[in-house]
Every structure is written in structure tokens, then in C-alpha cells.
Amino acid sequence: MSDTLTNIQTDARFWASDRELTLTTGDNLRIANGIYQGMLTPGYKFLGVSIGRRWPEVTRQDTSLTMVVGQENYTWPASPDFNEPYFIEGLNSSASNEPYPIDAAPDMESWSFYDQTGNAEPLFWRLIDVSAVLTLSLRPNPIRTDGIRITGCIEGTAWTTGSSTTIFKHVNSDHALSMLIGAHFQSKRGNANRAVELVDMAAGLLPVNDMSPALASRGRVRPWGNNSRRGMGK
């Protein structure tokens, strides 16, 4: 429950069997940050065990973008820093902001098909670099000034000192993190069996189920290869 890095270090020393292990500075701070960020990344595996979760603590929504009629490109928000996957919705400005999902473009053929279709509710989105600016593109181009809602898991704030804290709500998650850090150092020192034991112990402290819904695309429109071009025009 928002434990400090100093406390995580104390526990990690025990699991790593190293009373001198220092996580608050230098290379080990970077390593510890990497393991911490891995826990916050859906699908991340550590020594073959899935430890990434869709934590409620890092699930965010951003509504800073607004569609412009006929405009395809919008600068992706710099903050918060979302991890993939993203779930993107339009908010219908003519219907009390009723949301409608916009799917990730499944392939370039599908994306290309909607290049010149006229303004409508966007069906697809993609991210692309435009002159060194990360950009959200929508097709078909918007027909209204609808809002855009982005939902996803964000990166945690990186630790910088011993007083830096985790984002976790439950103490078991902090304990699991210290075990994973300990497992990393046990593994690096050739104690593979002990490292595996620690990862299994840590996994047992993590939530069994993700508390936030999956954010995968629903695939509203099939790509040409699955359903032919005729089906997309209906």
C-alpha cells in the first residue's frame, strides 16, 4: 500500500540473501524500476511467469482531445503516458456524449478503404509519427465535434530516491515486488531454483483476476481478407 523504495529494499535484501543490496541509487535503481514497471504492464512476464496486471491503480482515462469535422490527425496526449493496449471511444456531442467505440485499424487495406469515404463517425484509429509528433489518426474523418476518450494503463512514476513510493493499494503487491527484485538478483548469481521459488511466491500474492476490463479491440469491421471489400461498403 504505497510502500517506500527503502522498505522494498529492506525486504528485497532478505529475498536476495544480500544484506548489502542497494536499490536507491545507481544501476540497481534502474533495474528495480524496470521490474516495477513490468508489474504495471499488462501481459508482462518475469522468468516465464505472468506478473503484469491491469491494475485499477494505474487505469486512467483522458478526454483532452476533441474531434474537428473533417480532420484526421490529433496530437496524442503527452500525459498520462499510456501503456498498450488502448481503448478509444468517441463521445457523441449530439446525444449527451453517448460513447461509441473506435477500433484499432486491423490492417492497412482496411485503413486505406476509408481514406476517401466522406465524414462519418470514425470506425478506426491508428497511431503514427507526423514530423516527430506522435499522432492519433481517425477514419472516416469525423462528422461532428465529438470528444475522444482514451482508456488504458499508464506507466508508474519512476523511483528516484529511497522515499519514492509504489502506486499499489494493497500491501501484498508491495511484498510481491520485493520478492521479484530478490528473484532477479538470485537468478543473476546463479541461484535459478531459488529465483523460480520466489517468482512463484510473488505470483501467489498478486491478484488472480484483473480488476479492470480487457481493452482489446472488438473488430467491428472485418478486413478485406476475411470478408471481401463488398462487405465493408455496406
Image (spheres, rainbow, N blue to C red):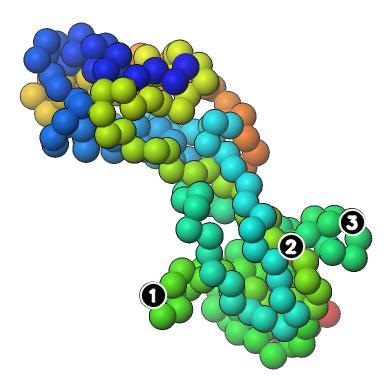
In the image, farthest residue toward the right: 95
Is 24 placed above or below 153 here? above
Find out whether the residues at labels 3 and 1 contact each other: C-beta distance under 8 Å: no
How many numbered marks appear?
Answer: 3
Residue that carries the numbered disc 2 in the rendered image: 147
User: Left or right: where does residue 6 sit relative to residue 96?
Assistant: left
Q: Which residue is painted at 40% across and 33% down in the image?
A: 39
Q: Whole-percent x and y of residue 84?
A: 49, 52
Q: Quadrant of the C terminus?
A: bottom right
Q: Quadrant of residue 145?
A: bottom right
Mark 2 or mark 1: name the one nearer the start of the chain.
1
Q: Nearer the viewer, residue 32 or 199?
A: 32
Q: Report the amino acid beneath label 3.
A: Ser
Is 90 placed above or below 135 here? above
**Marks 2 and 1, Cα distance to the nearest angstrom?**
24 Å
Q: Which residue is painted at 13% across and 35% down in the image?
A: 26
Find out whether the residues at labels 2 and 1 contact each other: C-beta distance under 8 Å: no
Q: Which residue is painted at 80% across and 55% down in the image?
A: 99
Q: Secondary structure at mark 3?
A: loop
Mark 3 or mark 1: name the one nearer the start of the chain.
3
Q: Report the amino acid beneath label 1.
A: Ala
Q: Which mark is residue 132?
A: 1
Q: Which residue is painted at 54% across and 31% down in the image?
A: 57
Q: Nearer the viewer, residue 203 or 151?
A: 151
Q: Whole-percent x and y of residue 37?
A: 37, 37
**Marks 3 and 2, Cα distance to the nearest angstrom?**
11 Å
User: Left or right: where does residue 170 sit relative to residue 22?
Assistant: right
Residue that carries the numbered disc 3 in the rendered image: 96
